[in-house]
Amino acid sequence: MAKTLKITLRRSLIGERPKARATIESLGLRKINSSVERPDTDSVRGMVHSVKHLLEVEEI
């Protein structure tokens, strides 16, 4: 696996369930097209998987 993941929010949170909004916030994403780099761990992968329809993920 890669050392870090670049995670970008690509879709709006309007109409999303509160759990999905909380997951996006815990990843550190705020606005559409905002990006963060997070370590490639199982917990981060799990969060990304639960909201994968809203994100774009790159391995760095």
Image (spheres, rainbow, N blue to C red):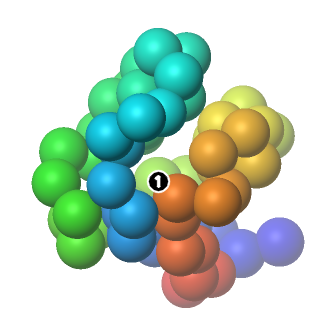
Up the image or down, 55 lies above or below 31; here it is below
Residue 18 position, x and y percent, is 47, 15
Amino acid found under the numbered disc labelled 1: Arg
Residue 37 position, x and y percent, is 39, 62
Which quadrant of the figure contains the C terminus?
Answer: bottom right
Residue 51 position, x and y percent, is 63, 45
Identify which residue, 16 or 2, lies in the foreground.
16
Q: In the rendered image, which residue does mark 1 sit on?
A: 38
Q: How many marks?
A: 1
Identify which residue, 40 or 54, lies in the foreground.
54
Instruction: In the displayed orientation, state which residue is furthest to the top.
Output: 18
Q: Residues within 10 Å of mark 1 (few under 14, many from 20)?
A: some
Up the image or down, 52 lies above or below 46; here it is below
Q: Quadrant of residue 59?
A: bottom right
Residue 46 position, x and y percent, is 77, 38
Q: Is residue 57 visible?
A: yes
Residue at image coords 63%, 69%: 3
Up the image or down, 39 lies above or below 25; here it is below
Residue at image coords 28%, 47%: 29
* Label 1 SS: strand
Identify which residue, 52 or 41, lies in the foreground.
52
Q: Is residue 23 visible?
A: no
Which quadrant of the figure contains the N terminus?
Answer: bottom right
